[in-house]
Amino acid sequence: MNAASFFTKEQQSEILDSIREAEKSTSGEIRVHIETRCPEEVLDRTAWIFTKLNMHKTAERNGVLFYLAVSDHKFAIIGDAGINAKVPEGFWDEIREQMEKSFSDGKFTDGLSKGILLAGSQLKNHFPHNKSDVNELSDEISFDHLKGNE
């Protein structure tokens, strides 16, 4: 199973649409990174990818990363310091549980899209969208080996 071919082009488009829809109501920035394998503990890996994607460089420190390792059946969601300072305990756990339900039924696109939209709707309470917001990070899905990744 290869990260870049795990989702069809249509499924990738659906995920991108979810990111764009979620970001309409919040200044938060959402990214998705998919790898074939996770070479370490999933939260450590997700934090490393978060930094490699420069997600910690948003003005309000409000980036969210959805990470999937498709062959290892691992995934994680992390938010930057600005988000974690404002959201309630268990915030990410609720989204993770919703995604896990879809994933266990083999509905990976649906689970990821729902998780993204749920994160966006929750983030708008703490980081509402305003007229001066700019899209600080690419919405494109990133795959496997980032430069310096090994």
Image (cartoon, rainbow, N blue to C red):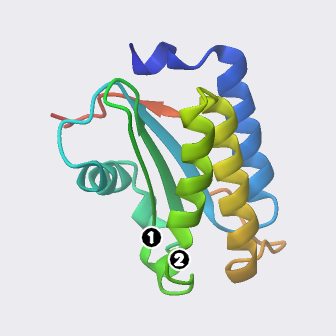
Q: Position of residue 140 (x, y in %)?
A: 59, 36
Instruction: Tell me the residue at 15%/34% (across/down).
Output: 150
Q: Position of residue 79 (x, y in %)?
A: 47, 66
Q: Amino acid at mark 2?
A: Ile
Contact flag, marks 2 and 1 (Cβ < 8 Å): yes
Secondary structure beneath label 2: helix
Dot 2 surroundings within 10 Å: few (below 14), some, or many (20 or more)? some
Is residue 137 among the parts visible in the rendering? no
Where does label 2 land, which residue? 83
Q: Position of residue 121 (x, y in %)?
A: 76, 65
Image check: 62 left or right of 12? left
Q: Amino acid at mark 1?
A: Asp
Rounded to the nearest angstrom, the CA distance separating label 2 from label 1 is: 6 Å
Secondary structure beneath label 1: loop
Is residue 59 among the parts visible in the rendering? yes
Dot 1 surroundings within 10 Å: few (below 14), some, or many (20 or more)? many
Which numbered tag is attached to residue 43?
none
Q: Position of residue 111 (x, y in %)?
A: 64, 40
Query: Quadrant location of residue 43?
Result: bottom left
Instruction: Tell me the residue at 65%/26% (across/down).
Output: 12
Query: Quadrant location of residue 128?
Result: bottom right
Where does label 1 land, which residue? 80
